[in-house]
Image (cartoon, helix red, strand yellow):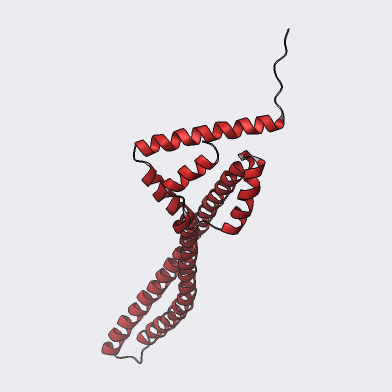
Amino acid sequence: MSSSPICTPQQSTGGTFEHLGRITRQLHEAMTQLGLDQSLHAIAQEFPDARDRLSHVGHMTEAAATKVLNLVDGGQPDCQAFKARSQDFAAQAQALGQSSSAGSAAAALLAQGSAFGHAATQFAENQSLLLTEIMMTQDFQDLSGQVIKKVIDIISETEKQLLELLMHSAPEHLAAVALPKAELAGPQVPEKALKQGDVDDLLASLGF
């Protein structure tokens, strides 16, 4: 009984690279015929900006939440001070209006002042509760910030894995040439995104 041929690690890696290259070529030609290459080019241009834009949204959200919290902290002391003064005014007006020395007209005016003082006290209390509620609802920033950070991490990891896949799949002599270029290129920017001709040249240089 004959045994199956054993593939060496080099043959296995080479086979993976050949297969990946053929699939890439077929996919690229199919999308070119369908007119999707321009769409992919646009995506390639926008993809490097996605992480920075998302990070910007996260920073803006955090800044907005911080500003709201600072405004709430600034408004609370005023509400508490207004509440205390209104309570004192209401109590004094009520006491003076009930004294025997106050005339009927003065007593009526003091009664109105006392009622206003109580209303102002309640208003200040309501505003204080409202500010507290606003402050408590800012926890959305923590949740949205976590989600945005997670998406940024996923984008970064996907980008890293794709680069590693290309480097590990390429033959040693091509990887040796590509590695210094990848290190010098730095982050991809829209102006440096591969165009259709670049993709054709790259595939042709790899034998596909």
97 over 79 or under it: above or below? below
121 over 25 or under it: above or below? below
Nearer-the-camera pick, 116 or 150: 150
Nearer-the-camera pick, 184 or 98: 184
Q: Position of residue 132 (x, y in %)?
A: 47, 66
The image quarter in which residue 27 lies:
top left
Q: Position of residue 86 (x, y in %)?
A: 41, 81
- In the rendered view of the protein, which quadrant contains the N terminus? top right
192 over 22 or under it: above or below? below
Q: Name the side, left or right, on which 112 lies relative to 201.
A: left
Nearer-the-camera pick, 18 or 154: 18
Q: Image point 63% across, 33% down: which residue?
A: 14
Q: Name the side, left or right, on which 132 lies relative to 206.
A: left
126 over 16 or under it: above or below? below
Q: Position of residue 83 (x, y in %)?
A: 44, 78
- Residue lying at the far left in this picture: please name it: 105
Q: Image point 33% across, 91% down: which residue?
A: 102
The image quarter in which residue 126 lies:
bottom left
Q: Position of residue 32 (x, y in %)?
A: 38, 39
Q: Image point 69% across, 33% down: which residue?
A: 10
